[in-house]
């Protein structure tokens, strides 16, 4: 009896290809029954061939620990119910590059990693699968032909659950009542041609079953480059309001989706750079705040000026988005953040062109200092009051006349005389600020000219900023 000479995939380099080595059942073939099918790309429709192969693998190899995993790669499975095949639960199983047609994975549990990299699934559902292992990998796999692809599946992994580059076409809901828990959950560059993807963010201990949702418990969740043409919903349930994993929505075009809703979502550690947020609906979102204004996580972890530009673009989109939703208070926060990015970019630019860049840096800083970029009406208001008092005090002590002498004494408590004197000074100050100075009848003294000029400049800056901020405040 010969041994199967099928060269196993993914074992060492080309020089040292491991051979299957299982006994050949008879006939003229040089392959075991399983690998004879694999070799000729024949569909495996008989589950007993698979069972026999698995049994042989277990008895001949795995006892001696020569193999690290059960090799079921590059096969074509047709109509196989894997719950009837005795798949080992305590050995890592690799199905990489295999094809499944009308197969079924139901009611199975695994204690070791399972890998379905680059597999093709046609009408092959996963139902009530429990995996408590290091990892589950569906990287670059393709799934189609079903309304529900994963139903009631529990994946609890110590490393990762990966759907990187996966392509799922399942009519309604790809993940129904599933719970995934892992430090890293990756839907990076995943394409979903499905009616919906409803994600629920839960804590590690929570086990929420909801047919509509895919419950996720992870430290880092990647949706970068996710392509979905159906409805998207991302929510934190009431019990898990505080759960905020690092979640990446970078390079996601939400405009392609039918709807995109962040419902009561904790987005304190959510990243949005390079994304199109045009039609996203934020319902009671929670963002990180600093100095009383909302902020996205991208800004907190930014590295360089290139980041800054893209963060600014996110803020511009958020501002527009919140304005369209008539949430002007938060839109103001996003505008403030956008201007902060612009200011920092101007300052970075100034380090390259010290003199050319200076005016814009001064403008940004002034605009920020005086009115928080038009978002604060109290600052210019108090600025105007200060300008008024500064003028009055100055005129009071230096006098109005050409002589430049002090008109009033400095006695405390103020006398009746000095009180009226200060009132005159206030009126004069007000006159300067309302450009009515010629009508007041006072004459300029050389010492008051500088004060008058300063008052006029401050007034010209502060009044428009005050009105702008006031208009923004009450624009509803
Ligand atoms: Zn073989």
Image: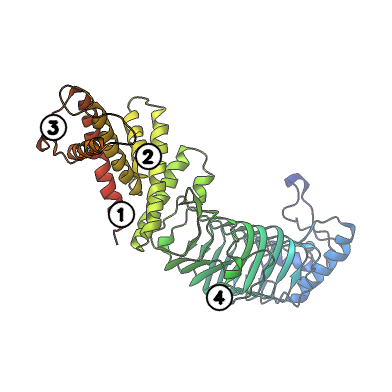
Quadrant in which ligand 1 is drawn = bottom right
Residue shown at the point (57%, 61%) measured from the top left: 166
Q: Residues within 10 Å of mark 4 (few under 14, many from 20)?
A: some
Closer to the observer: label 2 or label 4?
Answer: 2
Residue 106 locus on image (x, y percent)? 69, 76
For ligand 1, tell me if the residue under mark 3 lies within 8 Å: no
The image quadrant where one finds the N terminus is bottom right
The image quadrant where one finds the C terminus is bottom left
- Tell me the residue that label 2 is attached to: 369
Residue shown at the point (44%, 46%) measured from the top left: 311
Asked if labels 1 and 3 touch by Cβ distance under 8 angstroms, the answer is no
- Tell me the residue that label 3 is attached to: 442
Q: Name the secondary structure under disc 2.
A: helix
Q: Earlier in the sequence, mark 2 or mark 1?
A: 2
On the rendered structure, is 471 left or right of 218?
A: left
Q: Name the secondary structure under disc 1.
A: helix
- Tell me the residue that label 4 is attached to: 212
Asked if labels 4 and 1 touch by Cβ distance under 8 angstroms, the answer is no
Q: Earlier in the sequence, mark 1 or mark 4?
A: 4
Residue shown at the point (35%, 38%) measured from the top left: 364
Q: Name the secondary structure under disc 3.
A: loop
Q: Can residue 1 be seen by looking at this rendering?
A: no
Q: Gap between marks 3 and 1, in whole Å?
A: 38 Å
Asked if labels 1 and 2 touch by Cβ distance under 8 angstroms, the answer is no
Asked if labels 3 and 2 touch by Cβ distance under 8 angstroms, the answer is no
Q: Is residue 180 above or below residue 81?
A: above
Q: Earlier in the sequence, mark 4 or mark 3?
A: 4
Q: Gap between marks 2 and 1, in whole Å?
A: 17 Å
Closer to the observer: label 3 or label 1?
Answer: 3
């Amino acid at each position: 009896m010969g041994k199967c000479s099928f060269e196993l995939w993914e074992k060492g380099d080309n020089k040292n290809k491991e051979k299957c080595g299982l006994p050949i059942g008879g006939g003229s073939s040089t392959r075991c029954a399983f690998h004879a099918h694999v070799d000729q790309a024949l569909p495996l429709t008989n589950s007993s061939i698979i069972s026999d192969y698995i049994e042989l693998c277990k008895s001949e190899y795995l006892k001696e620990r020569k193999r690290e995993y059960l090799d079921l790669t590059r096969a074509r499975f047709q109509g196989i119910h894997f719950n009837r095949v005795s798949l080992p639960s305590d050995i890592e199983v690799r199905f990489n590059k295999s094809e499944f047609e009308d197969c079924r994975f139901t009611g199975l549990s695994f204690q070791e990693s399972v890998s379905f990299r680059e597999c093709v699934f046609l009408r092959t559902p996963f139902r009530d699968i429990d995996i408590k292992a290091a990892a589950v990998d569906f990287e670059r796999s393709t799934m189609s032909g079903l309304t529900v692809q994963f139903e009631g599946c529990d994946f609890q992994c110590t490393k990762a659950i990966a759907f990187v580059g996966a392509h799922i076409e399942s009519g309604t809901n790809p993940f129904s009542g599933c719970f995934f828990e892992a430090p890293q959950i990756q839907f990076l560059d995943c394409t979903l041609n499905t009616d919906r993807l409803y994600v629920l963010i839960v804590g590690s201990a929570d086990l929420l079953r909801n047919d509509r949702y895919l419950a996720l418990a992870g430290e880092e969740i990647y949706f970068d480059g996710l392509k979905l043409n159906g409805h998207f919903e991302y929510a934190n349930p009431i019990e898990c309001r505080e759960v905020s994993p690092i979640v990446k929505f970078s390079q996601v075009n939400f405009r392609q989706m039918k709807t995109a809703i962040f419902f009561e979502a904790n987005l304190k550690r959510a990243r949005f750079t390079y994304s199109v947020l045009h039609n996203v609906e934020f319902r009671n979102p929670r963002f990180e705040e600093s100095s009383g204004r909302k902020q996205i996580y991208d800004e907190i972890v930014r590295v360089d000026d290139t980041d800054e530009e893209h963060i600014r673009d996110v803020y511009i989109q958020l501002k527009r988005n919140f304005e369209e939703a008539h949430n002007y208070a938060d839109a103001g926060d996003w505008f403030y953040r956008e201007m902060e990015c612009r200011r920092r970019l101007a300052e970075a630019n100034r380090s390259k062109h010290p003199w050319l860049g200076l005016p814009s840096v001064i403008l940004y800083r002034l605009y920020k200092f005086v009115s928080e970029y038009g978002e604060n009406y109290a600052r210019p208001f108090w600025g105007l009051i200060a300008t008024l008092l500064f003028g009055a005090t100055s005129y009071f002590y230096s006098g109005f006349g050409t002589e430049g002498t002090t008109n009033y004494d400095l006695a405390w408590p103020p006398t009746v005389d000095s009180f009226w004197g200060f009132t005159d000074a206030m009126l004069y100050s007000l006159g300067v600020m309302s450009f009515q100075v010629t009508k007041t009848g006072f004459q300029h003294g050389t010492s008051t000219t500088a004060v008058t000029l300063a008052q006029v400049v401050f007034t010209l800056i502060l009044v428009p900023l005050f009105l702008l901020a006031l208009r923004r405040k009450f624009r509803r």
